[in-house]
């Protein structure tokens, strides 16, 4: 993402989602989004993906969406993580789960390692041009695609976005969080996995 | 070594619901039968590291997935399987094609033969090597043992050509 483009804060982007999500939605967050989501308050159906293998959040979301077609699954992924697993966009549209929304928060940097530019950001490229994630999503087969730079517009439209039959791709231009650190797991991962599996086995309200 | 119909029937008998896979020249011959089975869903992914994460999501969501990849894909997918199998301790089972095992003249010096089994040991995956058609039922036996113990496991199926 270019430094010159208008954007929203990660906090504003996520608090809007936190308010708009339904209690029976599954929300998977990675890296910086996971850190912020845990501050906002993660529910029993949420998976802050910590510890992670970077880039796998959309793939885990795809699996849950296929296993639980009656639930909405929302994945919040960063641009660095997305670049690490771009093929996931194609795998998602190949399986085409209508209940999956992938939100890409693009800040142009590897935030938790010191804000180094990604190869997709203008500042990390010889040609000085941002990689176009919207175009990548479209070329990967997404038909429902949204792009927001403004927090107020995102807040106005989020219900419509989440209600759109998916798979849905949402690009949010966000600003890096200065001095941000990596997320910490809120507890032992195996126990968290068992609990999530248990809660997911319950019928949605 | 096995027909697609045999493999699909085996997976159904194991209670598998989703097969997360990338084809190789052996595994790809099984895909049509897996797709035809009303009890199985084939989930195609673009790289093998994805397969472990998709399988993890399926497992968390209550499905019974299996990862079906070639050993080269095992090499590719190290960090993803580390996270799924060892950080989160999800008991994902995999079926891994062992390239060149039965025909070592196709790719002389194929290093798949050097690295496949040591890597499975390094990743602490309890595996069985399937070298003949008579071992078909050994796949189910090992799967059931791993399932009952809630541990990850694999079978490595010898392939006849690269």
Image (cartoon, rainbow, N blue to C red):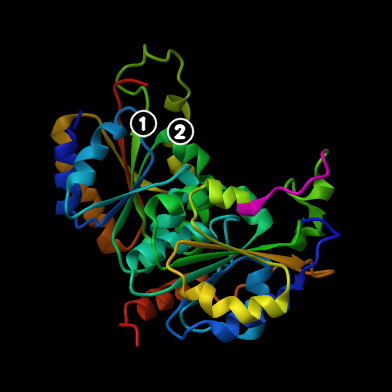
Residue range highlighted in magenta: A127-134
Residue A184 in view, yes or no: no
- Real-space CA distance between mark 2 and mark 1, rounded to the nearest whole angstrom: 10 Å
- The one nearer the camera, B145 or B13, is B13
Labelled pair 2, 1 in contact (Cβ < 8 Å): yes
- Tell me which numbered mark, 2 or 1, is placed earlier along the sequence: 1
- The one nearer the camera, A177 or B145, is A177
Query: Could you tell me which chain the residue with mark 1 belongs to?
Result: B
- The one nearer the camera, A25 or B95, is A25
Image location of residue A196, percent across then percent down: 42, 76
* Residue B84 vertical position relative to residue B50 in the rendered view, above or below: below
Horizontal relation, residue A55 to residue B96: left or right: right
* Residue B86 vertical position relative to residue A26 in the rendered view, above or below: above
Q: Residue at x 20, y 49 (%)?
A: B11
SS at circle 1: loop
* Residue A4 vertical position relative to residue B124 in the rendered view, above or below: below
Image location of residue B148, percent across then percent down: 25, 63
Query: Could you tell me which chain the residue with mark 2 belongs to?
Result: B
Q: Which numbered tag is attached to residue B24?
A: 1
Number of other residues with Cα within 10 Å of mark 2, as a class: few under 14, some 14 to 19, many 20 or more: some
SS at circle 2: helix
Q: Residue at x 23, y 38 (%)?
A: B32
Q: Residue at x 44, y 64 (%)?
A: A166
Could you say which quadrant of the image residue A6 lies in? bottom right
Image location of residue B33, percent across then percent down: 19, 40
Image location of residue A173, percent across then percent down: 72, 65
Name the residue tied to disc 2. Answer: B72
Could you say which quadrant of the image residue B8 lies in? top left
Instruction: Report the magenta stretch's main SS.
Output: loop
Q: Which numbered tag is attached to residue A191?
A: none
């Amino acid at each position: 993402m270019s430094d010159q483009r208008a954007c929203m804060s990660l906090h504003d982007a996520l608090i809007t989602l936190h308010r708009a999500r339904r209690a029976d939605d599954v929300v998977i967050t990675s890296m910086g989004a996971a850190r912020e989501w845990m501050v906002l308050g993660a529910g029993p159906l949420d998976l802050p993906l910590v510890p992670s293998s970077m880039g796998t959040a959309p793939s885990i979301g795809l699996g849950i969406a296929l296993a639980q077609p009656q639930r909405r699954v929302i994945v919040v992924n960063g641009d660095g993580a997305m670049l690490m697993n771009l093929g996931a966009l194609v795998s998602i549209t190949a399986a085409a789960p209508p209940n999956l929304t992938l939100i890409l928060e693009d800040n142009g940097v590897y935030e938790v390692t010191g804000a180094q530019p990604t190869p997709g950001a203008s500042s990390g490229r010889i040609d000085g041009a941002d990689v176009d994630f919207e175009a990548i999503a479209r070329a990967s087969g997404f038909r429902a695609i949204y792009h927001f730079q403004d927090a107020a517009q995102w807040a106005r439209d989020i219900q419509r976005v989440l209600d759109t039959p998916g798979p849905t791709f949402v690009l949010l231009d966000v600003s890096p969080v200065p001095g941000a650190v990596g997320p910490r797991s809120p507890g032992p991962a195996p126990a968290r996995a068992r609990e999530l599996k248990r809660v997911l086995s319950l019928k949605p309200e | 070594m096995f027909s697609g119909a045999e493999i699909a029937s085996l997976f159904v008998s194991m209670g598998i619901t989703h097969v997360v896979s990338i084809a190789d020249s052996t595994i790809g011959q099984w895909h049509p039968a897996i797709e035809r089975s009303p009890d199985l869903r084939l989930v195609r992914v673009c790289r093998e590291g994805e397969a472990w994460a998709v399988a993890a999501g399926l497992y968390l969501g209550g499905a019974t997935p299996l990862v079906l990849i070639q050993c080269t894909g095992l090499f590719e997918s190290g960090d993803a399987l580390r996270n799924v199998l060892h950080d989160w301790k999800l008991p994902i089972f995999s079926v891994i094609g062992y390239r060149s095992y039965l025909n070592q003249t196709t790719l002389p010096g194929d290093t798949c033969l050097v690295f496949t089994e040591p890597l499975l040991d390094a990743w602490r995956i309890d595996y069985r090597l399937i070298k003949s058609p008579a071992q078909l039922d050994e796949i189910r036996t090992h799967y059931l043992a791993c399932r009952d113990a809630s541990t990850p496991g694999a079978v490595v199926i010898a392939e006849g050509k690269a």
